[in-house]
Amino acid sequence: MSELSELAAAVRAHVEWLVTSGAAGVPRDRSGASPRAAAPNVVETAPNVVETAPNVVETAPDVAQTAPDVAQTPVIVQPSPAVVVAVPGAAAGAPAPLLDVSERRRRLELLAERVKPCTRCALHAGRTQTVFARGTGTSGLCFVGEGPGADEDAQGFPFVGKAGQLLDRMIEAMGFGRDDVYVCNIVKCRPPNNRKPEPEEMAACMPYLKEQLELLQPEVMVALGATAVQGLFGTTEGITRLRGRWKLYGGRTPVMPTFHPAFLLRNPAAKREVWDDLQAVLRQMGRQAPKR
């Protein structure tokens, strides 16, 4: 009995230390299982995607050369000051009232009109037009990328080039319609030569994205590439260290970092890891990928 008492006291002390130090649990899916755990009857095969990547127009993420064993990610993590990690639902503040579909669409359209003449950063000088978003977001899922490429700059919608076509196949493999998923970027104007946006460019554009997400209130978000994660959380870690590890945006929205589709076009072997991440997203939403 004394050994049990000592063990209970040790566990209590450890929990008190975690609370005091600010550590918090990694978000879990609605089934109660770990986000990295396999769900029953979930299709394990990667979606059918293009194997080659000529003339990729999307800006590719800056990916580190070495990848740690992400399967060993602990359930409890110590967050850096720039990244908030907590259990979904433990909101830092009360969310804005959820708008009905028509009112949300109206406000997003008004925001898109405000973005069109934006001159907050130097990127406006080389753009053809701003690239705001695509999709309705009625599924509750939102993908956030880096910035427009040449095709996006010409057409005015994000992810319409080769990387966008791959993203569409990923969305379909998850069981969603293309237009039911909301897709946007950290910056709304194309960087010259598809380079990575500069920190001041991302900072100038982030208020627009924050307002988009506040109006949209997605159930789950996927951050495509290191730049997307950097814009959302301020971290400078490489995507190979970040992918597959849940984060929390705004104190309430689970975010899954994963590789950018443009990276997958050049590195097809990474499709398996991304598919694992997307299946974790489905579990978080209480869904499964359709059987094929």
Image: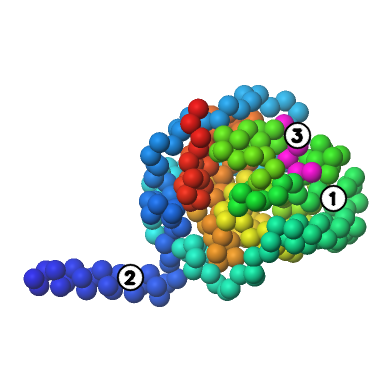
Asked if residue 114 is positioned above or below residue 291 in the image, the reply reads: below
Determine if the magenta segment contains residue 149.
no
Q: Which residues are magenta?
A: 157-162
Dot 3, crowdedness within 10 Å: few (<14), some or many (≥20)? many
Query: Mark 3 — residue?
Result: 161
Query: Mark 2 — residue?
Result: 15
Measured in 3D between alpha carbons, the distance from the residue under mark 1 to the one under mark 3, in whole angstroms, is: 16 Å
Determine if the magenta segment contains residue 160.
yes
Indicate left or right for 216 with 128 as reference.
left
Dot 1, crowdedness within 10 Å: few (<14), some or many (≥20)? many
Q: Is residue 22 visible?
A: yes
Instruction: Please identify, in this view, whether the residue under mark 2 or under mark 3 is nearer the observer.
Output: 3
Q: Amino acid at mark 1?
A: Thr
Q: Amino acid at mark 2?
A: Val
Residue that appears at 81% across and 36% down: 151
Q: Is residue 223 visible?
A: no
Instruction: Give x and y (percent) for residue 213.
Output: 68, 60
Measured in 3D between alpha carbons, the distance from the residue under mark 2 to the one under mark 3, in whole angstroms, is: 49 Å
Of the residues under marks 1 and 2, which one precedes in the sequence? 2
User: Which label was assigned to residue 176?
Assistant: none
Instruction: Assign a secondary structure to mark 2.
Output: helix
Of the residues under marks 1 and 3, which one precedes in the sequence? 1
Compare residues 1 and 204 and report the one nearer the observer. 1
Query: Mark 1 — residue?
Result: 130
